[in-house]
Amino acid sequence: MRIEINVSPDIKEPYAVINTNCVTAEISNIAEVLGKVGTSAPVIGYIDDRMVILDAKEISLIRVENEKVYASCKKEVYLVNKRMYELLEILGPDFMQVSKSACINLKFLESVEPSFNGVMLLYLKDGEKEYISRKFVPKLKEYLGL
């Protein structure tokens, strides 16, 4: 894919134009991602009696335990009052669901280790570990270019 960026002082607000001969899934995904840029709501985490605004770039793992959603960020675990699918929408394409109860920030992915029954163990840069279920392995392989 070829990319052009034109800079002009006459342009008041950035906009994107996609030229293509047909709309593919890749083009649709790109348009969706571009449409969401700058529109994400903040993620609020709770720890003890504090409310903390979490930076999406620092969240490594989101996990559901006992019907509650937790976000791991900077060696702390915060309770988040949103459902996992809502967080995936807010946080964008850097986050991928890896099991029924977990999603990871792909920027934190350090290594992948095959495990039993087609399941893989993911190691994150901040020391967190999470299993990826067979259902989500093809998407991870696509991300890794395998």
Image (spheres, rainbow, N blue to C red):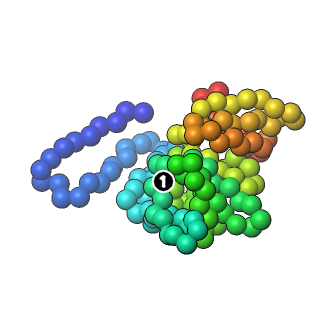
* Left or right for 50, reference 85: left
Depth check: give the residue in front, 89 or 47.
Answer: 47
* Left or right for 85, reference 136: left
* Left or right for 74, reference 16: right
Q: Looking at this view, name the residue that lies furthest to the left.
A: 9
* Tag count: 1
Where residue 114 sits: x, y (%)? 77, 29
- Quarter holding residue 47: bottom right
- Quarter holding residue 64: bottom right
- Quarter holding residue 65: bottom right
Q: Looking at this view, name the residue that lies furthest to the front.
A: 48
**Label 1 environment density (alpha carbons within 10 Å; few <14, some 14–19, many ≥20):** some
- Locate the C terminus and report the quarter of the image it occupies: top right
Where residue 127 sits: x, y (%)? 62, 38
Depth check: give the residue in front, 2 or 118.
Answer: 118
Where residue 49 sits: x, y (%)? 55, 72
Q: Helix, strand, or loop for circle 1?
A: helix
Depth check: give the residue in front, 39 or 1.
Answer: 39
Residue drawn 64% across the image and 30% down it: 111
Where residue 16 sits: x, y (%)? 32, 50
Residue drawn 57% across the image and 53% down it: 76
Q: Is residue 108 visible?
A: yes
Residue drawn 57% across the image and 36% down it: 125
- Locate the N terminus and report the quarter of the image it occupies: top left
Q: Is residue 85 visible?
A: no
Q: Which residue is mark 1?
A: 56
The answer to whether residue 65 is above or below residue 72 is below
The amino acid sitting under disc 1 is: Ala
Residue drawn 65% across the image and 50% down it: 103
